[in-house]
Image (cartoon, rainbow, N blue to C red):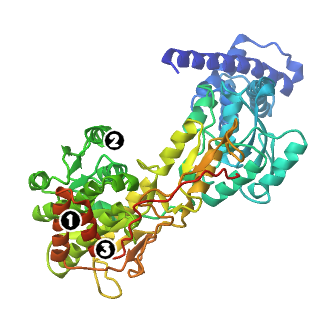
Amino acid sequence: MPPQRSVNRILLNVALDGVLAAVATPLARYIADPGGGLLHPLWFVAGGAITLLVAGLPFRMPQQYWRFAGIEDLLGLVGSSVVSAVLFALLLRVSGFPLPTPTFPVVHALTLIVALGTPRVVYRLRLARRAGRDGADAQSVLLVGAGDGADLFMRSLEYGEGRAAFRIVGLLSMREGQTGRRIHGHTILGPISQTTAVLARLRAEGRLPSALVLTQPALSGAPLAALLAQADVEGVPVRRVPRPTALQTAAEGGGTLELAPGASEDLLNRPQVPLDRDGMARLVHGRRVLVTGAGGTIGSELARQLAALGPDRLTLLDNGEYALWQIDQELNEAHPEVPRETVIADIRDEPRIRAVFDRVRPELVFHAAALKHVPMVEANPLEGLLTNAVGTRHVAEAARAAGASAMVFISTDKAVNPSSVMGASKRLAEMYCQALDVAARRGAGMRCVTVRFGNVLGSTGSVVPLFRHQLERGGPLTVTHPDMQRYFMTVREAVGLVLQASVLGMADITLPTGAQGGIFVFDMGEPVRIVDLARQMIRLAGLHPAEDGPEPGRIQIRFTGLRPGEKLFEELFHGSEPPVPTGHPGLLMAAPRTADPAIVGRAIDEIAAACRAGQIGLALILLGRMIPEFEHNAEGAPGRVLLPGG
C-alpha cells in the first residue's frame, strides 16, 4: 500500500474509533445511572474518546483492517476498552469527580467493546454476503484438505478481488472422524478415501463440482494418485491452490486467484530423508570446489547447494556458454559473498582440463558433465564414449595431479546391465573411478566417490518436460511402451544425497567383506510406470486421458515403441554387486567389482583411439570386452498406437 494511503487509513481508523468512544462513554453513564440522562458536558465526551485512543496505541488499534478483523484484533479491542475504562475512571478521580456508580468502569468497558466491535463484525458480514451474491455464477469447487490451507484459501475468496471466481460446495478431510464439521460455514463431506462416494452423491444432488482443489501440501504420491483416479471416474479435474503468498495477497485484496495445475513432483511418494548438513558443511566449508557440467540440471543444483555451504572458492565448468551464464547469474544474486569463477571447457580436451585444474588447484571435484540422453548417444556413440568414459578419465587424472583430496562421480542406473552405449560408457567410467578409489585406500592419493541413481524428475531431456510440452500442444503424450518403468527422484533430493554420499565416502566406510571401491546407490523407492505418470500428469493438468481418440478436454496417449538403447526396466544393482547398508537412510552401497586401474586405463585409451579414428565397430567391441553384461539394443522396437482408458 502507498505510504499516503496507509496514513489516510490510520487517520480514518482514529477518527472512527474516537467517534464511537465519544458515543459509548455517555451511553455507559446512562446505562449505569439512568437518572443522569444522556446529555453530558463536552469534556466528559472528549475524555472518553481521548482515553480510548491512548489506550488503543499499545494494542495497535489504529493499524487494524476492519475487513480482516480476527481473534487477535478482537482481543486487542477488548484490551483497549478495559484499559480505556480504567483510565477514564482514574481521570474522574484525579479531577475530583465521583464515579457515577461503583460499577461504572465495568459498564463503560462493556459498552466500549460492543460499540467498537459491532461495526467491525457488521462490516465483515456485509462483505461475506456480497461475496455470496457475486459468486452466484462462480465455478463450484470441492476442497481437498480441511486444515490451514483450506482456511487461507476460503479467506482469500471471501475478501479478495477474485471472490466471485469460485463457490465452495464442501470439503474432503485428510482423516476419518471429521465428517459433518464445518469450516467458515462449509461442511466437511467426508474423508478423501470416500471421494468417489462423495462425488457420486453430489452428482445425484445436482451439485457436482467443476474441480477438486488441493489445499493440503502434504498430499502426494500414492494417496494423490488414488485421488486423481477417483476424481476421474466422475470426470472432475484436480487443481492445486496457489502458493501461500499468492493466497495472502488475494486475501488482502491484491489480485484475482487462479488455480494452479498440480506439480509432477507431487506424484512421488517419497518421505523426506534426513541429511547430515553439519557433515556437508565440514566437507565443503573453506575448500576450493570445482563442478563439471555446472550448467546442467544436476550440476547447477550442485552449485546452488555447494554455494550455501561456504566454499573458499567455487569453480563452475561447462562447455555450454548460456547454461553456465545462467547459473553464474543466479549464484551472483543468491550467494554474492562466495568467490567463484566460470570456465568454458570440454572435458574431452585433456590439455585444457589439465591447465584449468593446475591453475585452480581444486580440493573437491564434483563431476557431473556427461551425455545422458540414451537415443542421442545411440545416434552419436563415439561422442558418448569420448565424453562419458574418456572425459571422466581426463577429469580424474587432472584432479589427482592437481592434488585434489576427492572426486565425486555422478553415475546412473543405466550403467547396470547396460543395453545402451550411454549406460555402458558410464559403467566403464564407474570401473575406472572404483579402481582409483581402491588404489587410494590402499595407499595415499585422491579418493573417488561414485554415486548412482535413476531419473531426475524434470531434468533436461527427461520425460516430464516432454509431457508438459505435449500437454501444452494438446497432445498426444508419447510413451515408448505400456510396461516401461523408471525410478524417479527430485533434483534437490538427488543432489542432497550426492553430498551425503560424499560425506560418507570420505569417512572411510568399510564394507562387511573388507573390500573397498563400492558405489553409493540411492534408495529410489518403487519404480513408476511411465504410462501411469502420463495419465496422472494429464489429470493434474485438469484434463482426462482419451479412451477413443482426441476430443475436447481429453488427451491421447500414443505408444511409439522402444528406442535404440532403451530397456523396459532399469536396475540399481548388478547381480554380482549385492546392496550393502551404509547406516544412513536413503543410501545403500553396491559391493564392488574392482579391476586394476592400469588395465581399465589402457582399455579407455584404446577406445579413445578407435573413437578418434571413427571406428565405431571397434570401439563397441572393445567396450563389450570390458563390460561382458553389455547387451546392446541398437535397434529398439517397433511402435504401435494405443489409446488407454483413464
Residue 55 seen in the current view: no
Which secondary structure lies at badge 3?
Answer: loop
Query: Could you say where residue 565 lies in the image, as x and y percent from the top left?
Result: 41, 61
Instruction: Evaluate if marks 2 and 1 touch, with contact meaning CB atoms under 8 Å apart.
Output: no
The disc, 2 or 3, on the residue closer to the chain's N-terminal end is 2
Q: In the picture shown, does residue 510 fall above or below 54? A: below
x 46%, y 69%: residue = 523
Query: Could you say where residue 472 lies in the image, as x and y percent from the top left?
Result: 56, 36
On screen, residue 468 versus residue 441, left or right, reads right
Query: Could you say where residue 549 lies in the image, as x and y percent from the top left?
Result: 69, 43
Label 2: few (<14), some (14–19) or many (≥20) C-alpha neighbours in 10 Å: few
Label 1: few (<14), some (14–19) or many (≥20) C-alpha neighbours in 10 Å: many
Q: Mark 2 points at which residue?
A: 334
Which secondary structure lies at badge 1?
Answer: helix
User: 7 and 626: which one is in front?
Assistant: 626
The disc, 2 or 1, on the residue closer to the chain's N-terminal end is 2
- Total marks shown come to 3
